[in-house]
Image: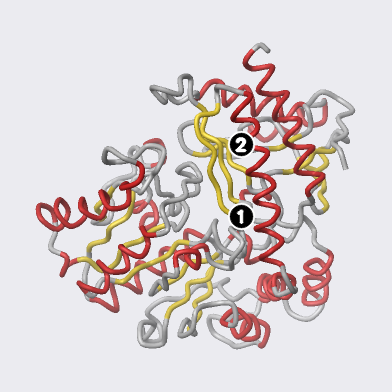
Amino acid sequence: MKPDIKLTPPGPLAVDILKRDSRVVSQSMVREYPLVLHHASDVNLWDVDGNRYLDFTAGIAVMNVGWNNPGVVRAVEEQAKLLSHGAFLDFCSEIPVKFAEKLTEFLPEGHNRVYFSNSGAECVEAALKLARYHTKRKYFISFYGGFHGRTYGALSLTASNVIQRKHFGPFLPVIHAPYAYPYRPFGLESATCDVDVIHYIKDQIFGTEVSPEEIAAIVVEPVQGEGGYIVPPLTFLKQLREICDEHDILLVADEVQSGCFRTGTFLASEHSGVKADIVCLSKAIGGGLPLGITVARDEIMTWPPGSHASTFGGNNLSCAAGLAVLEILQEQGFGEKVLDKGRYLLEGLHRLHERHDLIGDVRGIGLMCGIELVTNRETKEPARDERGRILRYAFEQGLTLLPAGASTIRFCPPLTIEKDDIATGLDILDRAFAKCEGI
């Protein structure tokens, strides 16, 4: 279904709501354009003025099974009639247990212990506390460009934009390393960008900053999200796994944005054949409801009663929604369809790369793809302003997109999207580039 823009957005109702928002709501969030939503269905969004948009954001990779998926809505409605808040902190109810049992079927063997929270940041916080408790060590390693949340522990790991950290320190003892970024390699060559990062950790961090025996965990996004939808070489996670095994360091995979078949496999780390010690899941796992999951092996998640908990963790509505999401993701061939549609999207993005000099790099796996915009392909100077104009023009034409990194446009549509919709979105994007470039 093609977008239907009746009024150039923002329309009068949207303008009024945005004015009210500015008077009473904290303005600490970033909104790329003035979209005020009214309702949604699958890959379509409607604003309060009646415009219909084609969505390439999935609510920041949350609505993997589509907006207002009927199965998820039905599960929430049925559960709401019985029990919404189960007080899982103090009492037990069956829905969270059923959800945890079902989730472990999707995970690598041995990942059989689930902790419930409410968001990506919270599940990362739980992973940090668990890693410290298990190892009795205090340091962490994470990566430049990484985003793990905005609560204090998660923010200590985050290093994607200084505005997120400014005036909030001091932070936990976290040491940042370069990420394996093929388009902007830390070393001299893209082909060795992962090896160069591993050498940096061994030679610089272990050699000059902190002994490996003091490091509790290395926390990594298998595909960097907010940092620019960066896909590292498949050998990168394997080499991190080897470092962790050598020094009894835990490997924590932050799959908050890359999980739930976003890359065509349930966990993005599966593409590398790597099994993390702790896995963080959120966003898509709740089907639009707040749900964070921290998963580990029995021998790691041994913290005693009272050591960590959450009032709303294991919320019955969220777990009912999550159970419905898992049932949809378990449908035959779901991952293969995501990979097929991802290839179709990447092929279209490569064609745009050939047509528009602003596009410096095309990358992605499954339906987690990005294009990095540059003012010059030789110098790779980020095209920040141009990206903003393209996002705004696409929005005005009925296509919702989001930025990532310094000058990347990310593509994370609902996984239910069809190829015709992908083609429609690419056509709008092509026109947006042409307008920006004055073609």
Count the marks: how many?
2
Please state if 65 lies on the left or on the right of 169 as rendered.
Answer: right
In x, y percent, where is residue 236? 36, 58
Q: Residue at x 71, y 37 (%)?
A: 400
In x, y percent, where is residue 77? 82, 71
Please state if 344 lies on the left or on the right of 311 as rendered.
Answer: right
In the drawing, what numbered circle is on residue 260? none
Mark 2, residue position: 350
**What is the C-alpha distance between the residues marked 1 and 2?**
15 Å
Query: In the rendered structure, which amino acid carries the disc numbered 2?
Result: His
Mark 1 surroundings within 10 Å by alpha-carbon count, few (fewer than 14), some (14 through 19), many (20 or more) = many
Q: Earlier in the sequence, mark 1 or mark 2?
A: 2
Which residue is nearer to you in this view: 321 or 433? 433
Q: Name the residue at the left extreme.
A: 208
Q: Residue at x 17, y 57 (%)?
A: 202
Secondary structure of the residue carrying tag 2 is helix
Which corner quadrant holds the C terminus?
top right
